[in-house]
Every structure is written in C-alpha cells, then in structure tokens.
Image (cartoon, rainbow, N blue to C red):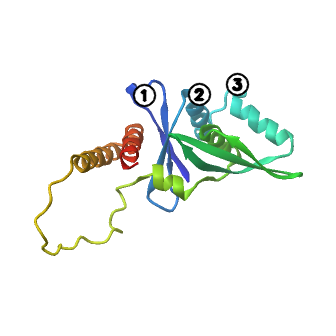
Amino acid sequence: MEIMGLSTSPSSGGAYALILNERDGNRRLPIIIGTFEAQAIALELERIKTPRPMTHDLMRNMIKGFGSQVQAVFINDLKDGTFFAQVQLESAGGEFVLDSRPSDAIALAIRFDAPIYVSDDILNEAGIVSEMITESIEPVRTPEPEAEPQPQKSSDHHMQLLEKKLAAAIAKEDYERAALIRDEINNLKA
C-alpha cells in the first residue's frame, strides 16, 4: 500500500482520515487517526525537520540505537471498527513482531522506508473500490425478459441509497464520510 494522503473535515472533531491506496490495484483504505499521529505522518512525508525529536523520531532513533530496523508494517485485523497492526523488526538477534496502532506503525514505516501491507480480508471488508478503474468490469448485457419485477424491500432501497452516498463521498474524496458510510453498509449486511 502507498499513502495517498490525509483528509479532514470540520465535523471530524480533530480526527483525520489516513488514506492508503493499493499499489497495484484500485482499492483504498481510509483509517481514522488522531491529530498528533496525522501530524507525525505529515511531517515525515513532507520531510520537515523539527528542532527537537518528535515521539516517532525518538522511536526510530531507539530502534536504530539497538541495532534494529523496521522491515515491514502489517495492518492485519479489524475488530469492532478498530484496525490493528504489527511492526516487523529485524536485528542481529533475529526477527520479532510488535503489536501497534496502524497510525504509529505507519509513522515508523515511513521513517524506515518500510513497506506497508494490508490483509486482503481487511481490504475486502473495509476497503473502498476506486471508481476510476471501471473499464475492467464486464460489459452490461441486456437481460433476458423474465417475470414481473418484485417490489424492492425497504432495506434493499436503503442499501442502494447508502451505496450512492458512498460513491458520491469517494468522488468528492471525502474519505472520512466514505468510511462512515462503508461501516453503516457493513452493519446492514451483518
């Protein structure tokens, strides 16, 4: 995954959406993170050096000081709307894995130029398919005539409305709203 960007909205209460983009695909993963974590990621992405080390810079210095390196970051679980991550470290003593919040893991990954991975299960559950790549979908075929159409159930209608709202939020690049709508759709499906 690649970091596509950070977005916020006035109604977010100070939270940001960190948008990860599938490197060789069309899925995006918005992850809601706090202001301080967003700042730590943005500062490193922009290569802005602070007069004193920030928390993630201190963590980088400590990891290097102990002769270790961050090899990769894995966003590997999603429970009750909360993402979980692991940081894979390598040192002379071998490899080991630490539990982490995704925002902290990603802040470290960019400081070590380490790859960011997301499990397919999480991308399938919480990812948003970019509408920019729609030509690969099979062409629409004219349906065979069949029995009279059945009236839609109200939950089907509600789901269609939510899917339209999701598409509109993605088109506007309002990924925080898209993440909330995606969660509502997932709750309805459950």
Residues packed near mark 1 inside 10 Å, few (<14), some (14 to 19) or many (20 plus): few
In front: mark 2 or mark 3?
2
Q: Nearer the viewer, residue 107 or 189?
A: 189
Q: CA distance from mark 3 to mark 1?
A: 29 Å
| 54 shown above or below 151 | above
Please give the label number shown on residue 177: none
Residue 49, x across and y down, in percent? 66, 32
- Mark 2 vs 1, N-terminal side: 1
Secondary element at tag 3 = loop
Residue 41, x across and y down, in percent? 59, 37
Amino acid on which the number 2 mark rests in the picture: Phe
Residue corresponding to mark 1:
12
| 64 shown above or below 15 | below
Q: CA distance from mark 2 to mark 1?
A: 14 Å
In front: mark 2 or mark 1?
1
**Residue at far bottom of view:** 144
Residues packed near mark 2 inside 10 Å, few (<14), some (14 to 19) or many (20 plus): some
CB of mark 2 within 8 Å of CB of mark 1? no
- Mark 3 vs 1, N-terminal side: 1
Q: CA distance from mark 2 to mark 3?
A: 17 Å
Amino acid on which the number 1 mark rests in the picture: Ser
Residue in the image at 59% along x and 32% along y: 37
Amino acid on which the number 3 mark rests in the picture: Pro
Q: Nearer the viewer, residue 134 or 81?
A: 81
Residue corresponding to mark 3:
51
Q: Judge left or right: residue 93 versus residue 137.
A: right
Residue 17, x across and y down, in percent? 48, 37
Quarter where residue 104 is shown: top right
Residues packed near mark 3 inside 10 Å, few (<14), some (14 to 19) or many (20 plus): few
Q: Quadrant of the N terminus?
A: bottom right
Quarter where residue 57 is shown: top right
Please give the label number shown on residue 36: 2
